[in-house]
Image (cartoon, grey):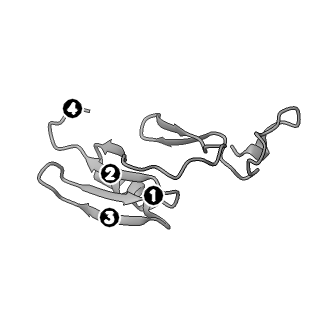
Amino acid sequence: MTFADMPDTESAPPGVSPDGVMHSALMFGDGDVILASDDPSGDGAGVKGAALTLMLADQDEARRLFDALAEDGVVHMELAETFWSPMFGSLVDRFGVSWMISVESEGEAS
């Protein structure tokens, strides 16, 4: 939902772009959701010093999400087997958000 989607009876903060994200949801898996929004103040300089991590049980789903997030982004590590995971990769998406995608090792608790 963008600020342009607000009803006529409401107004965005001064100087906020109508294309700015007011609310968003990334839905995946069996109802898992990540909620997000833009910083309407314009003070935000992107996400620094942290990454969102998705732990998944399925390698095909990990690949699908990784590829979608990598579109127009920067891949730091392609999905590959590591000593801690059968499939792990990291990237920065087109919005500057750092992600780590990891597949649970066999026997690992969700």
- Marks 2 and 1 sit apart, C-alpha to C-alpha, by 10 Å
Q: How many marks?
A: 4
Quadrant of the rendered image containing residue 14 = top right
Q: Nearer the viewer, mark 4 or mark 2?
A: 2
Q: Secondary structure at mark 1?
A: helix
Three-letter amino acid code of the residue under disc 3 = His
Quarter holding the C terminus is: top left
Percent x, y of residue 45: 52, 52
- Marks 1 and 3 sit apart, C-alpha to C-alpha, by 12 Å
Q: Secondary structure at mark 2?
A: strand
- Residues tagged 1 and 3 counted as in contact (Cβ below 8 A): no
- Marks 3 and 2 sit apart, C-alpha to C-alpha, by 12 Å
- Marks 4 and 2 sit apart, C-alpha to C-alpha, by 16 Å
Q: Which mark is residue 76?
A: 3
Q: Which residue is mark 2?
A: 101
Q: Earlier in the sequence, mark 4 or mark 2?
A: 2
Q: Which mark is residue 69?
A: 1
Q: Nearer the viewer, mark 3 or mark 2?
A: 3
Three-letter amino acid code of the residue under disc 4 = Ala
Percent x, y of residue 18: 76, 50
Q: Secondary structure at mark 3?
A: strand
Residue drawn where x is 68% and y is 43% of the image: 1
Three-letter amino acid code of the residue under disc 1 = Leu
Specify whether 3 is left or right of 38: right
Q: Which residue is mark 4?
A: 109
Q: Nearer the viewer, residue 41 or 2?
A: 41
Q: Earlier in the sequence, mark 1 or mark 4?
A: 1
